[in-house]
Image: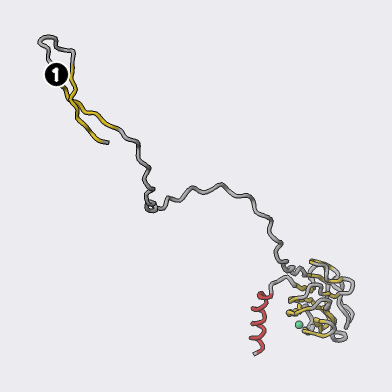
Amino acid sequence: MSRHQSLRPFYGLSSSPRVTVYYTYDYVLSGDPGRPGNPGKPGMKGREGVIGKAGPRGLKGQRGKPGISGTRQARSAFSVAVTKSYPKERTPIRFTRILLNEGNHYNASSGKFVCAIPGVYYFTYDITLANKHLAIGLVHNGQYKIKTFDANTGNYDVASGSTVLHLKESDQVWLQIFYSEQNGLFFDPFWTDSTFTGDGTVPSSSFFPLLIIRKHNLK
Ligand SMILES: [Ca+2]
């Protein structure tokens, strides 16, 4: 585009004497627009924006697979008492008064505890005697495990014993008199009980103090 100056006469405002006034003005000449230039180069990469807000909560997931099956906790324990004096020798003593029979593994008809849940069991017995000596033993599958002897000296005594056994299924445990005429077990419902107790529910670690004491006594 270029700028030009031009002088052109102006008529009209003055009448006499006639004056010709020249006046200067600019004007512009316009050509056709040129072609668009080439696109410029891309600008520099901008800075990273701020972290956006959290999206909406997703849908509930699928149900998980079943877990590994757990081990069944042993529930076998009993505590029983006699109801007769002077039991027959060399045969299982029947303790027919049931204080506890968890799992129903003590058989009051046979006098035997029959293991249904393998594991470690604690056994104990407290037997009152009168008028005779007492020779009583704890039997495991027909073998004496421990024996207790108490001589009658004209009054009443209480004999006791205890042990821990590891039992397999169907193992049998009971008490019996191991000498003839030394079955002094005495029962009186008004003032004494003789009991036989077994417990397989106690964790094995609970037996360690007992085992340590017994080992110490052997020295
Ligand atoms: Ca005694």
The quarter of the rendered structure image containing the C terminus is bottom right
Q: Residues within 10 Å of mark 1 (few under 14, many from 20)?
A: few
Query: Residue 76 appears in which quarter of the rendering?
Result: bottom right
Furthest-bottom residue in this view: 219
Q: In the picture shown, does residue 74 fall above or below 179?
A: above
| Residue 203 makes an appearance in the image | yes
Single out the residue that lies furthest toward the top: 16
The N terminus - image quarter: top left
Total numbered labels placed on residues in the image = 1
In the image, what residue occupies the spot 16% across and 12% down?
13
Task: Estimate the x, y position of residue 103 in percent, counting from the top left.
Answer: 80, 67
Residue 10 located left or right of residue 30: left
Q: Determine the secondary structure under disc 1.
A: strand
Q: Name the residue under label 1.
A: 21
Task: Determine which quarter of the picture holds residue 25.
Answer: top left
Q: Which residue is at the front of the view, 201 or 148? A: 201
Q: Where is residue 146 in the image (x, y as percent from the top left)?
A: 77, 84
Disc 1 Cβ-to-ligand 1 distance below 8 Å = no
Q: What percent of the width, then of the height, locates residue 141?
A: 84, 82
Q: Name the one closer to the observer, 143 or 168.
A: 168
Q: Is residue 179 left or right of residue 20?
A: right
Q: Which residue shows up at 69% across the image and 56% down it?
A: 63
Q: Is 203 displayed left or right of 44 in the figure?
A: right
Residue 134 in view: no
Whether residue 171 sits left or right of residue 120 in the image: it is right
Q: In this view, does 75 lie above or below 56?
A: below
Seen in the picture, residue 47 relative to 155 is either above or below; the reply is: above
What amino acid type should be assigned to the residue bearing mark 1?
Answer: Val
User: In the image, residue 169 lies at what x, y percent?
Assistant: 81, 76
Picture residue at 78% right of the left edge, 75% below the top: 118
